[in-house]
Image (cartoon, rainbow, N blue to C red):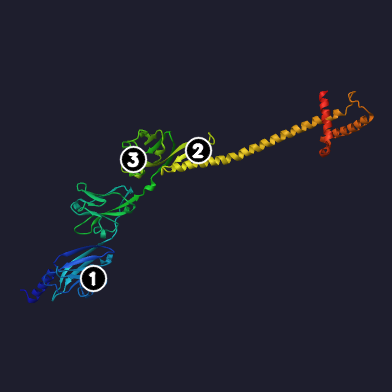
Amino acid sequence: MWSVQDLLFILCIVLSYVTRAAGVIHVFGYVGRDVDVSCSYGQGYESYEKYLCKNDCGDSDVLITTSQTNKNKYSIYDDKEKRSFTVTISDLQSVDAGKYWCGVTRTGKDIYTEVKLELGQDTCCDKVDKRESYEEDSVSIICRYELEYQNNLKFICRGNQPSTCLQQAVITSDSKQNGRFTLTEDKESRRFTVNINKLTQEDSGWYLCGVHRNTGLDVFSAVELEVKVWCCVKTLAMSGTVTRPITLQCPYPPHHQNNRKFLCKGDHRNNCTDMLSNGSRFTLQDDVSLSSFSVMITNLEAGDAGMYWCGSDSQWRAGNYTRIHLSVVFLGITTLNPTFAVETTVSPTNETNTTNSASKVLEGGALYVVAIVPAVLLILIVALIIVYKQKCHKVKETGVGITRHCEAAGEPKGSEEIYANEETVGFSKQTTSKLQGACNDYGNADDDQPDYENFTATEEIYCNENFHVSSHK
């Protein structure tokens, strides 16, 4: 037969079980972040004290009560209308994981609800899928999941923090479209794809593909995206001459053999004119063996100068096309010298530079004149020197002839030189002897260098008369 003491002991066990049979509350959080623990209570307990405790819930195990509001890293709020109180635990650490109790103070045995807190690291992931693309291009990020999550919410966010990923998701499977982001799902293949259009440098970085779980931490996979700038595209500089042909060479990847090849002209690849469809002077020839095609431009014109883009990829991936900077040159003839040609370049970036080129031609002609004038002056000086030397040479030859005639004047004459009286004869002899001496002195000019200033007019006349007499003889 049961004693009263036994019955009371059994009743206490039953009551104890009932107060703890409200179920286990599972709470999940991330190290370094905050977590909310929400506990509900029955009607009639709105004004009772509530608290959160740990371990055996002794006095030292009570972490916070509704009479304190804040204590250390814990805060509490009681929503009496919803009959639920919430405890927030801040700056979670690994030691905070474990079992907690939500309690309602009452006379006798308190009401308890078990709480199990699980923590995870707020980083992801051990494996990262790396993708790359280019500015203004698009990229597709593929996210896979397990079969059990087919009907769960899918989402993607930027960064590498799982704790805030869902709250900061750029797109979810519920919305499908958000600006430049588009989400499509293939449940049979158990994957969803996020497309990002018109990429910019700011789109580079980490992305987390997430699957929301009804219980437990969400499931994530990581993707690192690199958006490259267009400055890294290969650029070729070429120059051609007006009226002559030029060939533009464009390589392409081997797997683009069957792709459509293109050549367009414009300052930007997104705003250029197809030159193969509207110009008979442009001819394309594809060499599959070399994975390259060439475009010949016949009868080149000044207006052909500019920026060209050639490739085989309609998606404009940088490694699959070439940028060509073409300048056009023509030959201009100056009026100063018909053989003097000046090359003038038409700049592809500004057609007004043609005028500048003309001024360059004039400047070239001016430089040509400056170079020619000193040469002409030098030639004139050399010619004057040569003429001067020739005249001096003739003067020397004339001097030799005069000397010879003066010597001839000293020879005795015949009966033709008979004078009327002796005075005349004497004067004539005296004068003749003087003139002969002067002529002899002049004849020896090379040796004695006579004084030409003392050579009188009479002596000169005598020498000349003897020269003429000698000539008659």
Taking 105 as reference, is 436 left or right? right
Q: Nearer the viewer, residue 295 or 189?
A: 295
Residue 273: mark in rendering: 3
Q: Distance between the residues labelled 1 and 2?
A: 87 Å
Position of residue 294 measured from the top left corner of the image (x, y, whole percent)? 38, 35
The image quarter containing residue 5 is bottom left
Residue toward you, 392 or 212: 392
Pointer 3 and pointer 2: residues touching (CB < 8 Å)? no
Between the residue at mark 3 and the residue at mark 2, the CA separation in whole angstroms equals 32 Å
Amino acid type indicated by mark 3: Thr
Q: Mark 2, residues whose alpha carbon is within 10 Å: few (<14), some, or many (≥20)?
A: some
Q: Residue 75 carries which label?
A: 1
Total label count? 3
Q: Which residue is drawn at 20% across and 65% down?
A: 116
Percent x, y of residue 378:
64, 39
Q: Which of marks 1 and 2 is nearer the N terminus?
A: 1
Q: Quadrant of residue 370?
A: top right
Q: Counting residues from the N terminus, which is met first, the one under dot 3 or under dot 2?
A: 3
Q: Distance between the residues labelled 1 and 3?
A: 66 Å
Label 2 residue SS = strand
140 relative to 329 in the view: left or right: left
Q: Name the element at disc 3.
A: strand
User: Residue 342 shows which numbered tag?
Assistant: 2
The amino acid pointed to by label 2 is: Val
Does residue 404 appear in this view?
Answer: no
